[in-house]
Image (cartoon, helix red, strand yellow):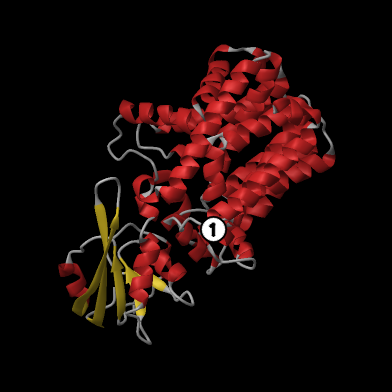
């Protein structure tokens, strides 16, 4: 099959990307939203230049896909578009550095691993981050090694978009500055480098100004997020996080990439490979360091594997590791197919947080009366209420939980008569401090894991005592 694909590498790459895009769009229609996806969709109904948790790009992109469809597959068009264009630019960058066949290998690696396929499914800020990281990497490479003026300007534009996507963008900036300092100090004399910086800051300035208006609340949240409260080292968290990389990027490809990063010195002699390597190493090292202090989500390292895929494809070609590549591709595909099948048919066992929420909201809707307000005990459940209730009414959190965007928008008199959806049997003593009447209307119990269940509780809340 590979021989057939290699006959026309460019067409093969484009067809593979198109196939996975169409397949994923159909596949996504059969999965309920994750709570985080519903939360970001809720942002798209309240467009602003920043949010407590993240920059605004995810809300902008969902806002646009809402014009196509607000169903689950419609919300996830953000992912399909982002990952497909990322794959396209990985092909373009690898081809620019090496050749067409190597570029096709980079696409095969990228599309086969579980990390990318998860990116095709879940709508998170990592989707636009991956998109603009890949495009920016491509134009930065062109600006540095080809030197056309338009490439500097396009780098600034897309770097600004990356900064609007997720604060992890700062790691990309660090990697580029390191490269310039170590290998290309002559660029400090190039006025277009400064034009690039100014343009990126101009694009990101509305988000920066929003943070300034809100006392840098989003920056402060991300600085504290994932930090250890006691300052102690937790080596087991590092090994858990490190081991997880072999799952999300597949065992063979991860082992091969890490081996080259640690043992091989080819990239020190080749400035082009060194540039790509820094975009990988800076991101990986940062999150490996952080993982000693707090549990890191595996998707945090996703941007590293964009350059990592390009680097790996080039090294496989240079060292003629055809058999290793085929084994790596086969194992990656087996893991990805197994994961996709599990998500589609065994969701309660592998991602129980996504299961039952839609049905719980639909049951709650049967008790809704005219004039009701809608509340929950957590930000994601409140977002589910807004997403799955007819006509998408406003919802809020009416129970002690972590600070979120709801807290930033909330008015003092937000408590009204209405319905309350809880994920667990709540401590009614708290609800009774804010409402005179708290009545349990119904309970929905669903599968949660192999031998356990979870329940949703629907309450009617009447006569608020006071509004916090």
Specify the farthest residue to the left: 429
Q: Classify the position of the C terminus by image quarter.
A: bottom left
Badge 1 element: loop
Q: Which residue is mark 1?
A: 29
- Give x and y (percent) for residue 151: 79, 40
Where on the picture, by quarter, is residue 295? top left
Query: Is residue 178 or residue 258 the one in the foreground?
Result: 258
Q: How many numbered discs sit on the rendered protein? A: 1
Q: Residue at x 30, y 47 (%)?
A: 449
Q: Residue at x 45, y 58 (%)?
A: 32
Q: Is residue 6 above or below residue 154?
A: above
16 left or right of 373 in image? right
Query: Is residue 272 or residue 13 the one in the foreground?
Result: 13
- Give x and y (percent) for residue 41: 51, 62
Query: Is residue 68 or residue 171 the one in the foreground?
Result: 68
Q: Residue at x 34, y 31 (%)?
A: 237
């Amino acid at each position: 099959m590979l021989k057939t694909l290699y006959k026309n590498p460019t067409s093969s790459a484009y067809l593979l990307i198109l196939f996975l895009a169409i397949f994923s769009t159909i596949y996504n229609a059969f999965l309920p939203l994750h709570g985080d996806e519903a939360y970001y969709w809720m942002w798209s109904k309240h467009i602003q230049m920043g949010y407590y948790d993240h920059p605004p790009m995810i809300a902008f992109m969902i806002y646009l896909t809402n014009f196509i469809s607000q169903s689950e597959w419609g919300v996830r068009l953000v992912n399909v578009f982002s990952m497909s264009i990322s794959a396209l630019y990985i092909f373009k960058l690898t081809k620019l550095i090496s050749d067409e066949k190597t570029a096709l290998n980079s696409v095969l690696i990228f599309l086969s691993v579980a990390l990318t396929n998860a990116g095709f499914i879940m709508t998170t800020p990592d989707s636009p981050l991956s998109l603009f990281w890949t495009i920016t990497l491509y134009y930065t490479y062109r600006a540095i090694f080809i030197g056309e003026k338009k490439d500097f300007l396009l780098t600034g534009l897309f770097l600004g978009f990356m900064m609007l996507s997720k604060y992890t963008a700062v790691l990309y900036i660090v990697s580029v500055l390191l490269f310039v300092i170590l290998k290309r100090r002559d660029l400090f004399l190039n006025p277009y480098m400064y034009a690039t910086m100014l343009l990126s800051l101009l694009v990101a300035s509305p988000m920066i100004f929003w943070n300034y208006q809100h006392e840098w609340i989003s920056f402060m949240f991300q600085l504290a997020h994932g930090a250890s409260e006691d300052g102690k080292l937790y080596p087991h968290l590092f090994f858990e996080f490190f081991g997880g990389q072999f799952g999300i990027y597949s065992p063979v490809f991860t082992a091969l990439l890490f081996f080259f990063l640690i043992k091989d010195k080819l990239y020190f002699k080749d400035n082009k490979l060194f540039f790509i390597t820094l975009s990988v190493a800076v991101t990986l090292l940062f999150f490996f360091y952080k993982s000693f202090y707090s549990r890191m989500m595996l998707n945090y390292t996703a941007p590293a594997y964009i350059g990592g895929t390009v680097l790996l494809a080039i090294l496989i070609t240079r060292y003629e590791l055809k058999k290793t590549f085929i084994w790596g591709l086969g194992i990656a595909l087996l893991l990805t197919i197994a994961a996709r099948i599990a998500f589609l048919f065994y969701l309660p066992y592998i991602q129980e947080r996504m299961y039952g929420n839609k049905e719980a909201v639909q049951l709650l809707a049967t008790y809704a009366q005219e004039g009701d307000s809608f509340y929950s005990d957590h930000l994601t459940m409140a977002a589910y209420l807004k997403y799955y209730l007819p006509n998408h009414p406003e919802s809020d959190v009416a129970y002690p939980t972590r600070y979120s965007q709801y807290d930033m928008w909330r008015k003092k008199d937000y408590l009204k008569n209405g319905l309350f959806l809880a994920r667990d049997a709540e401590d009614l003593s708290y609800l009774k401090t804010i409402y005179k009447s708290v009545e349990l209307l119904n309970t929905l119990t669903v599968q949660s894991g192999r031998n356990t269940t979870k329940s949703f509780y629907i309450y009617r809340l009447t006569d608020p005592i006071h509004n916090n």
